[in-house]
Image (spheres, coloured by chain):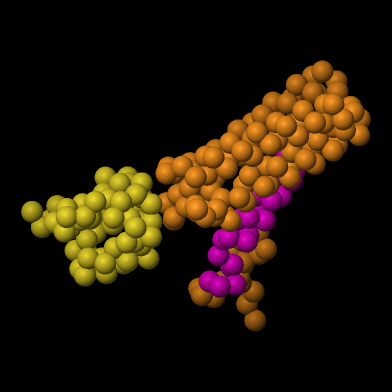
Amino acid sequence: MARISRSRLVTPAIALALGTVIACAVAVRQGWGVAVGCEAVGLVWAGCLYATGGSDSDTGSVIGAQGDERQQLVGLRAARLSLLIVVIALAVSCLIAAVAGTSIWPFEVLLVIIAITYFIGLRAFGVDASELEDGARYSWLGFRQKRTSH
Amino acid sequence: MENRVREYRTERGLSQAELAAALSVSRQTIISIESGRYLPSLTLAFRIARWFSEPVETMFVLEEESNGSH
């Protein structure tokens, strides 16, 4: 009997959980009929992800969360491309909403969250200025500060 | 950066899949390394060199060094 890899279940499980949350939110306002449809879409999507996760390919390894160093890099590049497209789509949506005179705050909130997490990521994964050994002092944002003479 | 992974692998009669399994990486990664599309990390470069019992600088050669030697 073939063993089921636990890591292969992670992405489909996340997709299924997100689909269920959305389906619950839909059920509150639009009734169970639409919610069941949403859940069914989530189930099919999770099934597709599980099937893809088992394939002998870069896509399969990335989705199945069992890739080697190159495949992790491929996954990061794909995520970066995806994020770039999301930011462009959000900016365009924000622009359209502003022109149409509808509420733009949901787009602004998402753009701010993306920007903040991007800078947090830069700080978290970059080299801390205090680790540098040239004796210079750096501000929180990484700018070199003037030395004060004593 | 040039590498001699394909040369050493074929010399030993190994398939890409067999080498990939021995190094615990994917077959696609071996293909990418051999074709020069992917430069492995220092860790993987050392693991490849150790597996073939060769110094890492024999397996992976800087282009300017390989041009200079010819």
- Is residue A123 in the magenta section? yes
Which residue is pictured at 61% across the width and 38% down the height? A47
Which residue is pictured at 28% across the width and 55% down the height? B18
Q: Chain B is drawn in which colour?
A: yellow
For the view shown, which residue lies furthest in the left direction? Answer: B70
For the view shown, which residue lies furthest in the top direction? Answer: A100
* Residue A12 picture quarter: top right
* Total numbered labels placed on residues in the image: 0
Asked if residue A21 lies left or right of residue A44, the reply is right
Which residue is pictured at 64% across the width and 39% down the height? A46
| Magenta-colored segment: predominant secondary structure | helix
Give how far across and how far down residue A17 sits, in percent.
Answer: 73, 45
Which residue is pictured at 53% across the width and 71% down the height? A132
- Is residue A42 in the magenta section? no
Image: magenta residue range: A106-132
Confirm whether residue A76 shows in the render: no
Q: In this view, does A112 lie above or below A126?
A: above
Asked if residue A39 lies left or right of residue B31, the reply is right
The chain shown in orange is which? A
Give how far across and how far down residue B70 sits, in percent.
Answer: 8, 54
Give how far across and how far down residue A138 sits, in percent.
Answer: 62, 66
